Amino acid sequence: MQFFVLAALIAVAAANPVYPSQTYPTSSYNRPSYSGSTYDAREYVSPNPHAFKWAVNDGYGSDYSHSESSDGQVTTGTYHVQLPDGRTQIVNYKADSYGYNADVKYEGEAKYPTYSGRSYSAPAYSAPAYSAPAYSAPAYSAPAYSSPAY
């Protein structure tokens, strides 16, 4: 019974605010009023007709290119990239009001490393060519403590 009385007192104390409610004055400036939207909702159109082309072939495995042209309504292009497995991926695409359509092709045959079944031993390292460092004795003497007198 005492528990319920104590719980009721705690609930009443928690429900009463410690500080009285405060009212704040309203602002004295005039709030702006907004009329209808001035935004012109037009469909997106490519900003300008454009065309570009670039390619990279450094002889070390980087071989890729990209070319694209647009008349302002329809964008067409192609790019190719050398894949790590030895194939070349060629993508021809067209983007217009119907969406983006891509035709992906692969040239060449994938080549993967062959597993020979051999096991390899750990590499044998020779002893280091340098000698271990030689440290000289410290230049200071050890402190001498006298025994305490009781």
Image (cartoon, grey):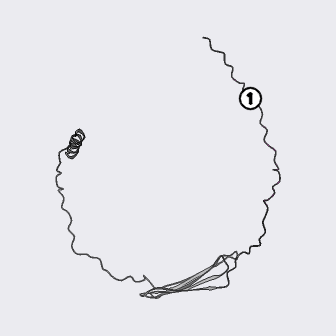
Q: Quadrant of residue 117?
A: bottom right
Location of the C terminus by quadrant is top right
Q: Which residues are magenta?
A: 118-142
Seen from the viewer's position, the closer of residues 147 and 75 is 147
Q: Residue at x 79, y 43 (%)?
A: 132
The answer to whether one can see residue 55 in this image is: no
Question: Circle 1 — which element?
Answer: loop
Relative to 9, 84 lies left or right: right
Q: Determine which residue is flagged by label 1.
A: 139
Q: Nearer the viewer, residue 44 or 134?
A: 134
- Which residue is located at x 78 percent, y 69 percent? 118
Q: Is residue 139 magenta?
A: yes
Above or below: residue 64 compared with residue 140: below
Residue at the front extreme, as displayed: 1
Residue type highlighted by circle 1 = Ala
Q: Residue 12: give x, y in percent of width and height.
A: 20, 44
